Amino acid sequence: MMDNFTPGPFTEELVTAGIPAHLHDWLGHMGIGALVVKMGIHFLEMSPERTVASMPVEGNTQVAGILHGGAHVVLAETLGSFAAGMHAGAGRHALGIEVSATHHRAIAAGTVTGTCTAIHLGRTLTTHEIVMTDEKGRRLSTARITNMLRDNDQGEA
């Protein structure tokens, strides 16, 4: 935990990614992850019930010039995992146990926005639906992620 006066090693990364200041204690010493940075994901809203972020299409395309299907899943898993982690709270962490996605429409340029909404926020499991849309609000894909919540001292199996 930070002392609120000494910035953590990832403070600049958190600010650049749009992480609200009240979450810097939680993420200040681990950051948001190298893949999230590489994908250009920028957070717009963060809570266990609703987390929103955007991502550029440019730099995240497949050989046909459209957004890679895996990029949709990276955005979805990022949003669902961060939301589950916030719900887990201090001394606990979230472990993804299932993620699925259905792609509805291709996109070749612009920005994708993912909106993650809680379906279930339990003591041991969370499930979120993530809808990716283009700048006109058209649905590009729909994903669902389930995370298991564990105490930090239990480790990962």
Image: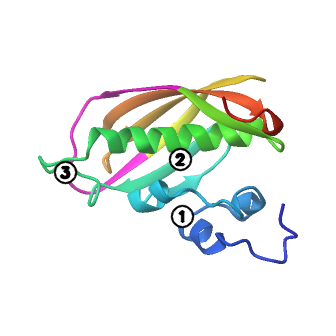
Observer-side mark, 2 or 1, equals 1
Q: Residue at point 46% right, 39% down?
A: 76
Where is residue 3? Give x, y as percent.
Answer: 88, 70
What is the residue that sits farthest to the right in this orientation? 3
How far apart marks 2 and 1 lie (CA) works out to 12 Å
Q: Residue furthest left?
A: 64
Camera sees residue 153: yes
Write down the residue under mark 1. 17
Which span is picked out in magenta? 98-113
Position of residue 115 measured from the top left corner of the image (x, y, whole percent): 49, 40
Rendered location of residue 69, percent (x, y): 29, 38
First in sequence: mark 2 vs mark 1: 1
Q: Which residue has dot 2 on it?
A: 52
Task: Name the spot of residue 102 as percent of width and height, x first.
Answer: 33, 26
Three-letter code, disc 2: Val
Give the amino acid type for the residue marked by disc 1 in the picture.
Answer: Ala
Q: Nearer the viewer, residue 72 or 34?
A: 34
Mark 3–mark 1 Cα distance, whole angstroms, equals 23 Å
The image quarter in which residue 90 lies: top right
> Does dot 3 land on a helix, a strand or a loop?
loop
Residue at the spot of label 3? 108
Front position in the image: 111 or 72: 72
Q: Secondary structure at mark 2?
A: strand
Q: Is residue 121 above or below residue 43?
A: above
